[in-house]
Image (spheres, rainbow, N blue to C red):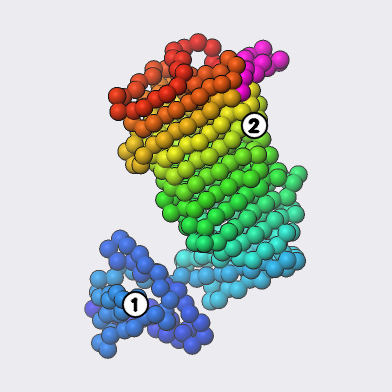
């Protein structure tokens, strides 16, 4: 009865708001959550249950109900408009089509819908809590700084609304780390598409981890001065399609977060320096000398997914792993096709020679399942180069020129 009374008290202000607007709520029941608008709710006469979207809920069994506050930012050429609804404690500064949002909200769940078009606009956000950003047909090119700069260090959900095309491009010659930059953890989902052009440094940059969830649509990095995708802690991909070309650095690079000495790995960061690819499609073309399609500072675990990587440049690598690499099919079917077309690169300063390699693993390479086909056609190139131990299961299909054991570091 106490919980029921609390729920009824919660909904009282919602009913008052119905006359003005539709408020959104999120209902948690037994670990699952669903989202509705208040206008969809129909309470029973005794107030012990409510119906919504062909489902009936017993108020006594609801874990919690949260009012979701939505801020909508619409870009329109030379200007932008912000609609707060009833969102508390969020302020804006708008200069032309450059929008800066600051939240001091420490209690309510916030989400932001970004839509419209501008060839000289941007969105900057800072706040203390995790939140969601919905890209709803957003086409945003910045003429100063990042297109989207999320300064919040918490978890950020980035949802590409189904059926939408979203385009981000930052300004050239700036100090921003990416056209899309996130100070915290970025989790991407939603069936829309996102095309990114990085004119100053990376295409997509996260200070901590980057996760592409199973529902993710297509992410295309059209150009990046440095890396196409740069993840500061770890990279995880469960689905979606990633297409990267035109980058000056790596296609996907994972960094190792360190302590203040810039050497010791930060023990507080889980999976620090690792990459996990569990499904989806990765298509990367490397055309820069000594660049890598995928570069991981510790271990790479592949448990599903389709890879199509071409290393065209001298000294380039399709995949380079400084730790160990494991390939299996625990999550999805694994199909890996890599071409090493470049030749050797001779560094005049260090006198080191860097060979073009399909897969380079400094530690051990274990292939338990899946299909791995690597063609090395460049002069002095390798298909697979393993400094540690190479192990292949009979369940795996591997077609590659393999060189195993310690030698030079190239």
Locate residue 61, reporting x and y percent: 25, 71
Q: Quadrant of residue 353?
A: top right
Viewport quadrant of the N terminus: bottom left
What residue span does the magenta drawing correspond to?
342-354
Locate residue 374, reporting x and y percent: 48, 26
- Is residue 374 or residue 24 the one in the foreground? 374
Mark 2, Cα crowd under 10 Å, few <14 / some 14-19 / many 20+, is many
Viewport quadrant of the C terminus: top right
In the visual, does 193 lie left or right of 198? left
- Is residue 270 or residue 305 the one in the foreground? 305
In the visual, does 82 lie left or right of 14? right
Say which residue appears at 40% left-offset and 69% top-offset: 35
Q: Quadrant of residue 302?
A: top left
Which numbered disc covers residue 161?
none
Locate residue 363, reporting x and y percent: 43, 21
361 w.r.t. 8: above or below: above
Indicate which label's residue lies in the foreground, 2 or 1. 2
Say which residue appears at 61% left-offset and 32% top-offset: 286
What secondary structure is found at the residue carrying circle 2? loop
7 w.r.t. 293: above or below: below
Say which residue appears at 41% left-offset and 35% top-offset: 335
Locate residue 312, reporting x and y percent: 61, 28
Residue 189, magenta (yes or no): no
Mark 1, Cα crowd under 10 Å, few <14 / some 14-19 / many 20+, is some
Residue identifier under label 1: 52
- Residue sitting farthest toward the top: 407
What secondary structure is found at the residue carrying circle 1? strand
Dominant secondary structure (helix, strand or loop) of the stretch shown in magenta: loop
Residue identifier under label 2: 287
From this viewpoint, is residue 357 visible? no
Between the C-alphas of marks 2 and 1, the distance is 54 Å
From this viewpoint, is residue 394 visible? yes
């Amino acid at each position: 009865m106490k919980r029921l009374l609390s729920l009824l008290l919660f909904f009282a202000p919602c009913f008052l708001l119905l006359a003005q607007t539709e408020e959104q709520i999120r209902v948690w029941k037994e670990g699952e959550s669903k989202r509705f608008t208040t206008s969809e709710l129909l309470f029973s006469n005794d107030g012990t249950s409510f119906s919504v979207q062909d489902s009936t809920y017993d108020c006594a069994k609801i874990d919690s109900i949260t009012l979701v506050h939505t801020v909508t930012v619409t870009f329109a050429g030379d200007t932008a408009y912000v609609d707060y609804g009833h969102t508390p404690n969020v302020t804006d500064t708008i200069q032309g089509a450059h929008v800066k949002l600051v939240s001091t909200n420490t209690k309510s769940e916030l989400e932001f819908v970004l839509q419209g078009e501008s060839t000289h606009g941007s969105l900057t956000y800072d706040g203390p809590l995790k939140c969601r950003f919905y890209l709803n047909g957003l086409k945003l090119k910045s003429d100063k700084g990042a297109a989207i700069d999320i300064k919040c260090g918490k978890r950020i959900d980035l949802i590409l609304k189904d059926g939408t095309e979203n385009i981000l491009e930052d300004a050239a010659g700036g100090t921003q780390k990416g056209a899309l930059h996130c100070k915290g953890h970025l989790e991407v989902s939603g069936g829309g598409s996102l095309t990114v052009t990085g004119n100053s440094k990376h295409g997509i940059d996260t200070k901590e981890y980057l996760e592409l969830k199973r529902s993710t649509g297509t992410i295309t990095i059209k150009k990046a001065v440095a890396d196409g995708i740069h993840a500061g802690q770890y990279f995880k991909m469960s689905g979606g399609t990633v297409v990267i070309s035109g980058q000056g650095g790596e296609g996907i690079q994972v960094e190792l977060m360190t302590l203040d000495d810039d050497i010791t790995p930060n023990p507080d960061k889980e999976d620090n320096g690792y990459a996990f690819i569990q499904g989806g499609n990765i298509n990367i073309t490397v055309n820069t000398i000594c660049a890598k399609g995928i570069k991981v500072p510790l271990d790479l675990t592949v448990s599903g997914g389709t890879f199509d990587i071409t290393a065209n440049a001298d000294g380039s690598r399709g995949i380079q792993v400084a730790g160990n690499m494991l390939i299996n099919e625990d999550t999805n079917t694994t199909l890996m096709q890599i071409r090493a077309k470049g030749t050797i690169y001779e560094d005049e300063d260090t006198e080191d020679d860097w060979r073009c390699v399909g897969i380079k693993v400094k530690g051990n390479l274990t292939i338990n399942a899946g299909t791995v086909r690597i063609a090395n056609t460049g002069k002095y190139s390798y298909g697979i180069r393993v400094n540690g131990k190479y192990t292949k299961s009979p369940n795996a299909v591997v077609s590659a020129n393999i060189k195993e054991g310690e030698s030079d570091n190239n």
